[in-house]
């Protein structure tokens, strides 16, 4: 009964997860032409392993010297949107490139490649429609692990092949907000040797209704985490607001991690399930990765 009530709160709260300004994603040339940033923006279309889709798109932010210093390899942060979002949500709602530029200018963040994929489920190329954002409830109810199932090859392997990356655990970070935090949690546990840094921003730690039946991704979490923490991530951060409707659930999850002796850090903030917190969580996380 308690889980049912929490899931009802989840369903209602998802409406505020990502209020991106675009009903569908902007064209690639519009994204790449955004002015005023130190780094290099690329909107990259990549082949999809999902049988119903031929391709997806991700937004990549490269360090300013990427194409000048052709011998250097860079670590990668994979950053996920939440429900009602797409690959542009962190740009629209958090001004993420400017924030990263400022942290680097202050010497607080290292150079890395930022990759923001579209993590929604779509049924066909026609429905995908340039990566449009889904309604919150649709995104929540239809999540079934299909995108996650292909993430390691479609996104991570593609990124390693296209860019000069540090293609090992120490060179990869994964983070996400709300529903994207859930995806980051399960993907990092499913691929324990893939990600050396994990950031969970206001996540829920139980699979959604559709996802719970796809146990290859969304099953046996604690068994997977046992493997993950046999060689623990360099940093595993759980971020939550004190009035976030997920806060009681996440405190239980975090206490179980403590009992099991899994190294992690709980970062508490004032306020709830809101962008002002996710922005602060992102700022804190990027200062901790790849140190």
Image (cartoon, helix red, strand yellow):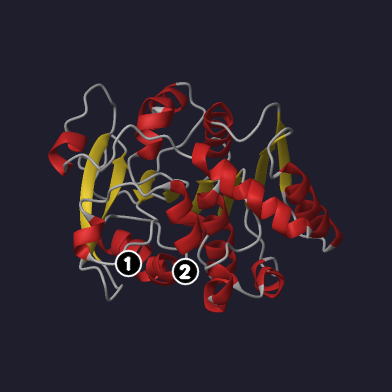
Q: At numbered mark 1, what does the secondary structure look like: helix, strand or loop? A: helix
Residue 172 seen in this snapshot: no
Q: Residue at x 22, y 46 (%)?
A: 43
The answer to which image quadrant residue 138 occupies is bottom left
Q: Residues within 10 Å of mark 1 (few under 14, many from 20)?
A: some
Relative to residue 102, is residue 232 depicted above or below?
A: below
Between discs 2 and 1, the one toward the N terminus: 2
Whole-percent x, y for residue 282 in the image: 53, 36
Q: Residue at x 20, y 68 (%)?
A: 54
Q: Quadrant of the C terminus?
A: top right
Q: Quadrant of the N terminus?
A: bottom right
Alpha carbon of mark 2 to alpha carbon of mark 1: how far? 14 Å
Relative depth, front residue between 228 and 170: 228
Residue 32 relative to residue 246: left or right: left
Q: At numbered mark 2, what does the secondary structure look like: helix, strand or loop? A: loop
Q: Residue at x 46, y 37 (%)?
A: 110
Whole-percent x, y for residue 290 in the image: 52, 46
Q: Determine which of the numbered discs, if any, sits on residue 145 in the image.
A: 2
Relative depth, front residue between 118 and 237: 118
Between circles 2 and 1, the one closer to the viewer is: 2
Q: Label 1, on which residue? A: 154
Proximity of marks 2 and 1: CB atoms separated by less than 8 Å: no
Whole-percent x, y for residue 272 in the image: 65, 32
Q: Residues within 10 Å of mark 2 (few under 14, many from 20)?
A: many
Relative depth, front residue between 26 and 226: 26
Q: Determine which of the numbered discs, if any, sits on residue 20 in the image.
A: none
Residue 242 seen in this snapshot: yes
Residue 235 relative to residue 214: left or right: right
| Count of numbered tags | 2
* Residue farthest right in this picture: 259
Q: Residue at x 65, y 73 (%)?
A: 224
Whole-percent x, y for residue 29 in the image: 13, 39
């Amino acid at each position: 009964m308690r889980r049912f009530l929490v899931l009802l709160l989840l369903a209602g709260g998802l409406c505020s997860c990502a209020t991106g300004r675009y009903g569908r994603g902007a064209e690639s040339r519009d994204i790449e032409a955004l002015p005023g940033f130190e780094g290099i923006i690329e909107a990259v279309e990549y082949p999809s392993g999902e049988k119903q889709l031929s391709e997806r798109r991700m937004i990549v932010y490269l360090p300013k010297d990427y194409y000048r210093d052709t011998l250097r390899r860079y670590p990668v942060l994979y950053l996920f949107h939440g429900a009602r979002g797409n690959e542009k949500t962190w740009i629209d709602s958090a001004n993420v490139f400017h924030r990263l530029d400022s942290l680097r200018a202050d010497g607080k963040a290292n150079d890395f490649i930022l990759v923001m994929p579209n993590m929604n489920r779509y049924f066909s190329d026609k429905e995908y429609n340039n990566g449009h954002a889904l309604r919150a409830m649709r995104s929540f109810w239809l999540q079934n692990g299909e995108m996650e199932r292909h993430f390691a090859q479609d996104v991570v392997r593609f990124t390693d092949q296209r860019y000069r990356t540090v293609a090992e655990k120490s060179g990869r970070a994964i983070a996400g907000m709300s529903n994207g935090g859930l995806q980051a949690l399960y993907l990092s546990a499913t691929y324990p040797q893939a990600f050396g840094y994990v950031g969970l921003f206001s996540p829920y730690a139980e699979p959604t209704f559709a996802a719970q039946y796809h146990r290859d991704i969304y099953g046996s979490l604690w068994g997977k985490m046992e493997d993950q923490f046999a060689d623990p991530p360099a940093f595993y951060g759980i971020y939550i607001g004190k009035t976030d409707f997920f806060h009681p659930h996440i405190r239980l999850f975090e206490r179980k991690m403590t009992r099991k002796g899994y190294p992690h850090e709980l970062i508490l903030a004032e306020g709830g399930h809101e962008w002002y917190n996710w922005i602060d969580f992102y700022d804190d996380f990027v200062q901790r990765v790849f140190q």
